[in-house]
Structures are given as C-alpha cells and as structure tokens.
Amino acid sequence: MHWVRRTALCVAGVVALGGLTACSSLMLPGNTSSITFVSTTTTDGWKYDYYRNNAYPCSVSGYQTFVVGTKVGSSAGSSQPLWVFMHGGGAGYFDTSGNPVPGNGQKVEESAVSLTTHLTNNGLVGRIRADAAGFRTLAVSYCSHDIYAGADTPDPNNPNTTPDGKPRPTNGVYSTKAAIEYVHDHYPTTKTFLQGTSAGSAGTFGVAWAMQLQNIAPAGVVADASLVNTEAFAAAKAAGFCTDNNDPARVAAIAARIQPDLANVANEPDKLVASGRLVVPILHIWNHGDSNTCGSPPIACPMRDGSVVTLGLTDCIHEPMRRAIAALGAGSRSKNFPVCVDNDGTPDCSLHVVTPRVGLTNTDPTTPADYLGGIMTWVHARLADI
C-alpha cells in the first residue's frame, strides 16, 4: 500500500522540500508489500516476531530483516508507544576490485537471534521494557552498511546481485522506514522513538528527517555517540588523529553509497537543526573522550560561523550540534546530554556507546549521575508532549 503512494507523495511534496533535490526520495515511504513473517520466539516474558523484507536486499547476501517485541499478556489491540533500536557497526563500501571494506560484516542478512539481542539488553532498552507506558520494541537490520542512509542508492563497485540478477543498492533509510510503517499498520501505535548507537546514532538523524518529510515524524530521537561532521573529521585528519577513519578516500567511498541529500554537507544534522529543517526532538548524547572518535586530544576545531576554537576531538565533532540545540533555547524539547562514563576505572570518559550499559555512573556535573534515569525523564516528557 505504501509503495504505490510514492509518486503521489512525491508530486505533492516538491514545493515543501526546502533545500532538497527536487522530488527527494527521502520523503517517500518504504515498501512494505514484500514483508513476510518468518518466526517467533519468547524470552523473559516477551514475544519477538521476526520478519524479512524481500523488497530490500543486503549488500552481499540476504535481505533486510527486523524483529518486533511485545510483552506477553499485553493486548494486541491496544495502542502503545514504539521504541525503535538502530544498532551500530561502522560504515562500509566496496573497493574498485569489488571487495567489501572492511569486510562482509554488516553486509549480510541479520538473524532473529542477532536482532533480538538488542531488544533484550538491560541498559536503556531494559528500562523501556519495564516502563509503565507499555512500549513495544523494534530492532531493524543494518545490512546495507550505509549509516542507514541509502534509498535505492546505487552501490559503486558492488559485484553482488540478487537471485534474479539485479544489482543490490543501499536501502538503510527505506528498510528502516518500511519496518516502522509495517509496525504502525499491524500493531496499534501511539508515539514512535528512535534510539541509535554508534553508526545507528549517526543514522537516526537522516531517518528522522526522512520520516518528518513523510509526515510520520518520530516523537523523539535518542542519539548515542555518533553523528556526521565532515569538517571536524577533516580537522582531525589534518591534526594527525584518526587518520584511517578520516581518510578522504574512505569518506568519499562511504558518501557515494548514501542518498544524495544525506550525503550533501549542507544537510549535516546540526545544520538541519540550526536552519529549522529538522524539528524532531533530539536527545544528543556523547561521551567526552569516546575512544571510537580517538578520545579528547586538543585540535583546532572549525565552527559553522568560520571561527576556530580549541576543543578535544570528540567534543569538536559534537560542538556544532551542541550549539544548534543550545540556540533553540531553554524551552526546546531537544536537549544536549554530554556524559563522562567509563567502565575501566579511568577518568577519561572513553567508553564508546553508553546507553546499553548497566551499573555505570556519569561524572559530568551537567547531566544526572544516573544518566539512564535522566534519559527516561526526557522520554517521559516527550510522551507527554501534545
């Protein structure tokens, strides 16, 4: 049903795109017509339904999948909020010889067991499962390895084809939206939240924008650890930090697999927020010395107004978004949520991805020591939004 409405939606939305390519594919719905039920398992009082979407192939083999979690005994007909989990796994591409970089990982079909693991985590998702709001949960796959940013986007140098000989494009945006739309159609849903960790965090902004353009905007985004800031990546490379990750050839190869509007530097997440083009409430979480972004060595950090300030590398990456959210004012539903969290006894705030963890304490005085509780306070406020 969603698939056949694409042309009509596209035509209707051309005038309102504001900075997008004409008739941007981002605003189009996902294809739910080829989703099939595969299996069900029950764990610790929750039922997990596993689905496959044959409209969207993975980069190497198989198809995009997802798992829907419902509490055993809850009413199938009751309207409940939906918690969507977008896991990480870096970003990849194919080199000029057709080899997957860095490998096949995150480019093949994800199993029910693998996806369900993300929904049985006892960190933030554990608090969501126990919450009185009665959330359903959804874990989406990441087998395009595209920062959840492909939308029927050609995949340069990918030699793999589907069983009928067709190319395998990237479809992180579409497959995620299709999974969400399928749940909306088959499980009565009130508000939808996106939680992303690492590459999933970077992906939440593009998916949220695409959902907003489609008029199914989520009620909130919980983005843990990562976002795209190519100017900061270039500054890190120039300073000699994270030189492999920030190599221009790698950055260009990843961008080539991404839907053009999301690959456009003018549409980086902080710029969408600052310009008022992305209005979905955001909880912007980062750990000051995140080891995945090479910690906190001081670098000359470029700001959007042309100035340069000295900041630790991870803080540099997040500073434009911090400023964009701060500029929205105290009454904004979006919030900056910096933390200093470690699991190794060091005070360097180096842990990458903090929301799936249990029993850790935040020592950044600007956010609660029980940072998971602080996140839930923000979620409850968004549930109460009119």
Image: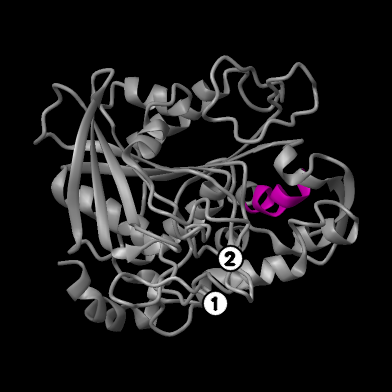
The image position of residue 217, as x and y in percent, is 35, 55
Q: Amino acid at mark 1?
A: Pro
Residue 316 forms part of the magenta stretch = yes
In depth, the one of 366 and 267 nearer the eye is 267
Residue at image mark 2: 93
Q: Quadrant of the C terminus?
A: top left
In depth, the one of 27 and 306 nearer the eye is 27
Please say if 15 is above or below 200.
below
Q: Circle 1 sits in a helix, a strand or a loop, which is it?
A: loop
Please say if 155 is above or below 268.
below
Write the residue at 28% across / 18% down. Answer: 44
Q: Circle 2 sits in a helix, a strand or a loop, which is it?
A: strand
CA distance for labels 2 and 1: 8 Å
Q: Quadrant of the N terminus?
A: bottom left
Write the residue at 71% across / 27% down. Answer: 340
Q: Which mark is residue 268?
A: none
Q: Quadrant of residue 381?
A: top left
Residue at image mark 1: 156
Q: Is residue 151 left or right of residue 320?
A: left
- Give the main secondary structure of the magenta stretch: helix
Magenta region: 315-324
- Rate crowding at label 1 as few (under 14), some (14 to 19) or many (20 or more) other CA atoms within 10 Å: some
The image position of residue 76, as x and y in percent, is 11, 34
Proximity of marks 2 and 1: CB atoms separated by less than 8 Å: yes
